[in-house]
Image (spheres, helix red, strand yellow):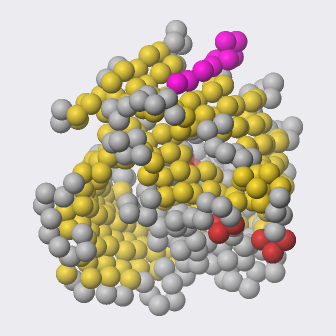
Amino acid sequence: METLTNNGTAFVTNINYNEKGQRLLIEYGNNTSTEYQYDPNTFRLNRLKTLRTGNSSTLQDLNYTYDPVGNIVEINDNAQETTLYNNAPVEPRKKFTYDALYRILSGNGRELIGLAQASSGGYSADSIGAADTHAVHKYTQQYEYDELGNITKLTHTTPTSSLNWTRNYVYDTATNRLLKHDVNQTLPDYQYDAHGNITQMPHLPAMAWSFKDELKEVTLNAGGDKAYYVYDASGNRALKVVVKGNIREERYYLGDYEVYRKFVSNSLHTERSTVHVSDDKKKIALLEKQTVPEGSLTPNSSLVTRYQYDDHLGSASLELNENADIISYEEYHPFGTTSYLKHNTNISQKCYKYVGKERDEETGLYYYGARYYAAWLCRFVSVDPLQHKYPYY
C-alpha cells in the first residue's frame, strides 16, 4: 500500500518500504510524515520520528535502545523537553530492566502528579483529564513475581513520598486467581464465576458474563448505575449502553463506523459519529462529526480529523488534526496506565489508547476483543478464550 483515500480525501499520500517490507516513511494528508530507522543487522526499530513537513518541526522522536536479546531497555523522546521538579531534571526518557526470564523488573519515566494513583483506591474514573503540564516528576515501578509468573508486588516510587505506594497481590493457591491487591485491603475481595471470570472488583460491585465469557452487564457503583454490552455473532462488541441516573449513553459499533449518543431524561443531548480510517498495518485517522452538541441539532457541523501516531506497541501517543495541530499527547506506564497526558479540552477525549485498544471510561477496563484488561492490575479480568480449546494447558 502506498496511498490511502476516503471519500476523495487523501489521508496517506506516500509510503516507502525497505527490502524486508518494513516501513521507512509514511506521509500523511495533513502535511506530516513519520520516518522509521532500523538496525542494519537486527532490523529492530531504532528511531521513529514524526515531522510537520511544512516547517520541519519535530513532533515525535522516539529513540530505542535494546539489550542483546532484543528487550527494550531505554526509550528517549527527543521531541519533548526536559523539565524541572524540585530543581531536579525530569527527562522524557523511559528505562526498563528485566530478569533472566525476560520479565520486566522495573520501569521508570516521567509522570504527571495528578495521575499518580494510590494502591487502595483501585481505579478512579475521574482521575484522567486535562492535565497540568508543569507538575511532572519522575517515577519508578518495580515488579516481583512468583514461580508461576504472577505479579506478587508492585512498588511505585516518586520524589513525593505521599504519592508512593505498594500493591501486594494475594492469589488463591489452587487456581492462581487474584483475591486481593493489598494484604490489608478493606475493600471487597475479587470474586469469580465457575469459568474464572471476575464477577466483583473493589470499584465494581457486580460483573455478569455470558456463557461465551463475554462481559454483558456491570454494576458501576453502590447507587446502581449500570453498563450493558451487546456482541454480534462473531463476538465483536456491537453496542455499549451506560446508565447513570437520568443520563443514558449509547455507543454503536458498525465495523469502522461508530455512533455515540447521550440522552438526558430521555431527550437526545449529544450525538457524535466516528469513522475509522485504517490501512493494512494500523489506524491512520478518526473522522469525528458532532451532529447534536448540547441538545442543538447541527446537521452541517464541522468534521474533526484525528490523525493517530503510535509507538512501537501501537499505543496512541500523539493525535493531530487536519492542520497538524496537537489534539492530545499521552505516555503510559509499563503495563498501560496513563503516566502523562496533554489534551485539547475543546475536543472529546480519545477512546483508543494503550496498544490501540478502546478504554471504557465507565469501568477503566480496556476492551481487547476477546477479553477485558485492567491496566492498573497488569492482568486480564476474564478467562483466556483458548482455555476452551486447550483445557489441559
What residue appears at the point 24 percent right and 69 percent down from the top-left corner?
293
Image vertical order of residue 263 relative to residue 347, above or below: below
Which quarter shows the N terminus? top left
Give coordinates of residue 223: x percent, y percent: 47, 90
- What residue occupies the far front of the structure in this picture? 55
Residue 156 lies in quadrant: bottom right
Q: Is residue 284 left or right of residue 391?
A: left
The one nearer the camera, 341 or 68, is 341
**How many discs mark residues in the rendered view?**
0
Residue 75 lies in quadrant: top right
Give coordinates of residue 287: x percent, y percent: 29, 48
Image vertical order of residue 180 relative to residue 381, above or below: below
Q: Is residue 200 visible?
A: no
What residue appears at the point 44 percent right and 16 percent down from the top-left corner?
16
The one nearer the camera, 372 or 330, is 330
What residue appears at the point 28 percent right and 64 percent down from the top-left corner?
260
What residue appears at the point 38 percent right and 83 percent down from the top-left corner?
244
Image vertical order of residue 183 relative to residue 213, above or below: below
Residue 102 lies in magenta, yes or no? no
Q: Is residue 362 left or right of residue 89?
A: left
The one nearer the camera, 121 or 307, is 307
Q: Which residues are magenta?
A: 35-43
Give coordinates of residue 300: x percent, y percent: 13, 57
Residue 30 lies in quadrant: top left
- What residue occupies the far top of the structure in this picture? 19
Which quarter shows the C terminus? top right
Q: Is residue 310 visible?
A: yes
Give coordinates of residue 254: x percent, y percent: 26, 52
